[in-house]
Amino acid sequence: MGTSKAGVITIDFGRNICLTPEIMKILAETGNRAKNCSFIYKNKKYNLYIPIIGKNTNAYKDAMEVLKKEDNNRGFAGFMRVYEIYRDLGVTLQEIK
């Protein structure tokens, strides 16, 4: 489910905590709005903020390659690992209290 407010799209992933390169491509490259993605993990709620990312930058391409190699080249990574991979691109993670 997604909503839009003040130039940011909010997407609630619930307990689905893994992201794939295909999902990250959609989140990073679709539209001209940042994304707030919320997740529930161990009964805590987290927000993964994904800004508008330039898809033609080397940093973005490198991050996508790292994500593709996660989970023995299956390309699955939990949102916390996605944050680690993409944080140099402005992705942030915070627990929502």
Image (spheres, rainbow, N blue to C red):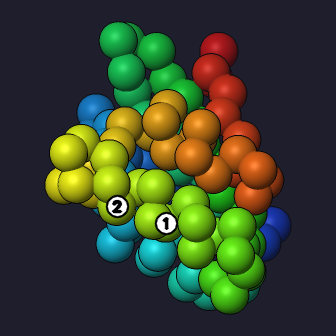
Is 72 left, or right, of 7 in this rendering?
Answer: left
Which of the pair 51/65 is nearer the observer? 65
Q: Is residue 10 above or below residue 58?
A: above
Q: Position of residue 86 (x, y in %)?
A: 63, 51
Residue 40 is at least partly visible in this image: yes
Mark 2 highlights which residue?
68
Q: Position of residue 12 (x, y in %)?
A: 43, 48
Which residue type carries mark 2? Lys
Which residue type carries mark 1? Met
Q: Is residue 74 above or below residue 62?
A: above
Q: What count of labels does the image hold?
A: 2
Q: Secondary structure at mark 2?
A: helix
Whether residues under marks 2 and 1 lie with C-beta atoms below 8 angstroms apart, the answer is: yes
Q: Position of residue 28 (x, y in %)?
A: 58, 72
Q: Which of the 4 image quarters holds residue 43?
A: top left
Taking the spot 54% from the left edge, 29% from the top edge, the residue there is 46
Q: Secondary structure at mark 1?
A: helix
